[in-house]
Amino acid sequence: MAFILLVEDEKLLRWSLQQRLEKEGHEVHTAEDLAEAKRHLAEHRPDLMLLDLSLPDGHGLDFYEQNRSILDETVVLVMTAVGQVEDAVRAMKLGALDFLSKPIDHRALADLVNRSIEVRATKRDAGLAKRIQEQQLEEDVIAESEEFRRTLEIATDVTRSQVQTILLLGESGTGKNVVARHIHRVSERRDQPFFEVNCAAIPDQLMESELFGHEKGAFTDAKSSRKGSFELAEGGTVLLDEVGEIRYDLQAKLLHLLEDRTFRRVGGARELRADVTVVAATNRNLRRMVEQKKFRDDLYYRLSVFPIEVPALRDRRDDILPLARMFLKHLKKKTGRTFDCLTRDAENVLLAYAWPGNVRELRNVMERAVILERGPHLEVGSLVLDCIQTVISPDEALTSPAPVEMPQGIVPLEEVEREMVKRAMDAAGDNQTRAAELLGVTRDQLRYRLKKFEEE
């Protein structure tokens, strides 16, 4: 379904076109002149605009030119009378996708609109992939520690040996996606798309379409064909983050792609090729999942041809302060704050902390600190850590950076989370949807935690 704005002054034609497009499943808003069309654009950004050129209060192309920035992601189709060839040429130069000559053939209109929506979706997805790639590949890779440098060296060696399937293992928040982007950056595919799929965040019923795409009519809401991640990343790299979350029946299709580099869209009969490097990442114990019949053994062995373990932050302590300073630099720019640096005591606290949430937790701590700190230096008092620890001296932090024991009565945050999930499920009578509502999370987020706690 697409949101369409139809700008046409002839009442009967406007009504008939609206009826035909709504029959195709689209949501159609109409405007009889440019003033009304402008009011619509002030409230909504249509997926597609059907624009008549001769309107009571002006020329359609003048309106299009004046609103090009607003219509940047909108497909524009113009409707022209016979003999308006110059107008059609001008429309194409402005960025209109196509034009229809009056009188309008309703069947041709419906086909053109559906094709145009597919073109828009493809361009939007490809544009999104490019923006994500540009944003992510600009991030700094901090590797001051010997442990993380060695991890990147192994990843580089594996990549340059032309291995096309790599498995990244490690705790949540260690930076597996950073290693994946490093793999893409040092590969021969560096100038092609880098596409990241968070398998834990996509509902089960949408996962197959997200990975492989679908054909028009493949399911109820499939009004047009759509390319999946493997097609959009053609020639580049696909990161399957949290690959252990892919449902069991879909794992066979992923295995087929990894072995033959071919796949079919949902509802499609044609075999398509996937010239991509696949990097899979997980913080789960896939071997144990295989034993529990929750992960296919053949897929596990196919993924783990060359597994790379990404070390926890507590095992690469030489990276803690460089990472903290990098986050501080980016956050200062983002928030407009002007901190000089971390104080020595603040640095020692960061070094002494266990970082159960790894690099992700460090970033969150720095973000909170930037919000809380009011002085010229970032002080200890602004470091809000999830697990309360006893205060140690700066000398102790430098000589013995191991985590300190928590005071009596304080329990790890994960234990609290596990207990809250258990209580919510009990209160909801094991209804996951209701339990998720009680916890203020999505059903998929709850299911992820249930799986995680079940394996521990």
Image (cartoon, grey):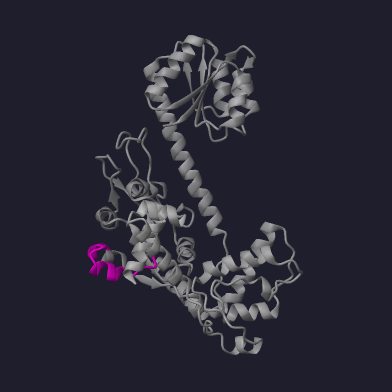
Residue 301 lies in what quarter of the image?
bottom left
Instruction: Give the residue drawn at x 32%, y 67%.
Output: 454
Numbered marks: total? 0
Height in image: 451 above or below 312?
above
Instruction: Give the residue drawn at x 67%, y 62%.
Output: 371
Where does the image place residue 18, in percent across and percent down from the top left? Answer: 45, 19
- Residue 82 appears in the picture as rendered: no
* Foreground of the two, 443 or 58: 443
Residue 393 painted magenta: no
Where does the image place residue 280, in percent across and percent down from the top left? Answer: 37, 62
- Magenta-colored span: 278-299
- Residue 18 appears in the picture as rendered: yes
Q: Does residue 371 appear left or right of residue 142 in this picture?
A: right
Quarter of the figure that contains the N terminus: top left
Residue 380 lies in what quarter of the image?
bottom right
Where does the image place residue 156, in percent across and percent down from the top left? Answer: 44, 69
Q: Does residue 48 appear left or right of residue 168 in this picture?
A: right
Quarter of the figure that contains the C terminus: bottom left
* Foreground of the two, 445 or 107: 445
Q: Does residue 137 appear left or right of residue 277 in this picture?
A: right
Instruction: Give the residue drawn at x 63%, y 29%.
Output: 67
Height in image: 435 above or below 311?
above
Where does the image place residue 399, in percent across and percent down from the top left? Answer: 59, 90
* Foreground of the two, 390 or 353: 390
